[in-house]
Image: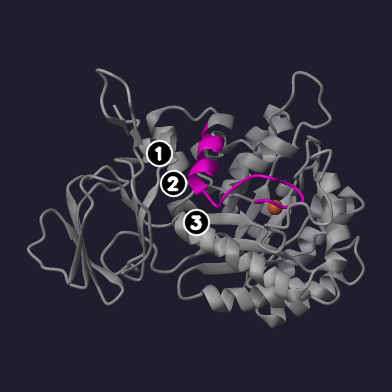
Amino acid sequence: MDLLIRNANLPDGRGAVDIAILDGRIAQVGPQLALRGREEIDAAGALVTPPFVDAHFHMDATLSYGLPRINESGTLLEGIALWGELKPHLTQEALIARALQYCDWAVARGLLAIRTHVDVCDERLLAVEALLEVKRQVAPYLDMQLVAFPQDGLLRSPNAFANLQRAIAMGVDVVGGIPHFERSMEQGAESVRLLCAFAADKGLRVDMHCDESDDPLSRHIETLAFYAQQMGLQGRVAGSHLTSMHSMDNYYVSKLLPLIREAGVAAIANPLINITLQGRHDSYPKRRGMTRVPEMMAAGIDCAFGHDCVMDPWYSLGSADMLEVAHMGLHVAQMTSQSAMRACFDAVTVNPARILGLPGYGLQPGCHADLVILDARDAVEALRLRAGRRYVIRRGKVISRAPAMPAQLHLPGRPGQVDFRL
Ligand code: FE2
């Protein structure tokens, strides 16, 4: 074997498992494998997981914090205005440099697959060209999936649909949209129809910013589910954000969720950003704004958590840490039972991998040997500690490594160090 990982705990609860890796793929998984590896890592009871996957990100805006100025109000709309101010000053070199730096952070966090939206409302399609180049450069160590995103509205912004089609022709993977930002509810619904028809015609996936609003009457997810079902797009469509669902009438939601399930539409919540940007027009009580994740999971809808933003016009924090994303999602959704916490871990690993359609993802023999060894014993402990990534492995090779970091104590009569475990 090229690499043997000994004594691993797996996310499904199995313990003391060995993982054998040959030619970049997982060859065997089982207890005490009678094999030798050219390299062996003793996981010593640590959690070994397939890599983190971010189902929703904006790589064209990331790490631009403060350019050309800081978002003072912190609102979604000032963020969109600020991005509009920045767009004319973007250069391909700077876009590529920032995106590559973010991918470095991602690798160190064990985040090896990212679906990123890319704004197509700039006539030059500068960001599209830049992110296609980044995708090519990082392909050996990180899977990027690009979504053609008409930030200023498909029908509201001149040439947006033509630009979106140009972006797809250039190699962008997924069809995006933003129906709640169109000029009217009718135009929003029409944008959903046009985009689903285009995706069906081209055999593409769809991922729309959908109902990122506190308006309970923003119901474009209903239209998205309708066209997904009518046009045979089941399993290929995701609704991102879906925050209006937080504010919707319960009776309406009881009809809506089975329709989303039937249409095979996935839901992507972005807890760090939703809790920050939603409810801004409220005094008190102040709505959280995140969509109904546990209820959708219970209804059989595929749900993932995305990071959405890191150090950009909308969000000044973040460091590519999907455990931080899941940790916030867990709190906002009050998903505190053991099984719900494990579901939050799935929402940043296996669920988004399924939504993105990542081939060879997982821990079964035959899967790509893409693994993360965490400084935690199980998924709940990983969430609690936002555990360090001791080893990040891509195609059987260690591409990032970090030391365990217990604190050294200097207290009379007390232990010499703490690692925050019981
Ligand atoms: Fe977004």
Using the rendered view, name the quadrant where residue 249 is placed: top right
The part of the chain drawn in magenta is 309-330
Percent across and percent down for residue 255 are 65, 37
Q: Residue at 55% across / 64% down in the picture?
A: 103
Q: Please check the rendered image and state whether residue 269 is part of the magenta-colored stretch, yes or no.
A: no
Percent across and percent down for residue 345 are 44, 43
Vertical arrangement, residue 206 with respect to residue 414, above or below: below
Amino acid under label 2?
A: Asp
Amino acid under label 3?
A: Val
Local SS, label 3: strand
Give the foreground label among 2 and 3. Answer: 3
Q: Which mark is residue 342?
A: 1
Q: Are the residues at dot 1 and dot 2 in contact (C-beta closer than 8 Å)?
A: yes
Q: Which mark is residue 87?
A: none
Q: Which mark is residue 346?
A: 2
Residue wearing tag 3: 53
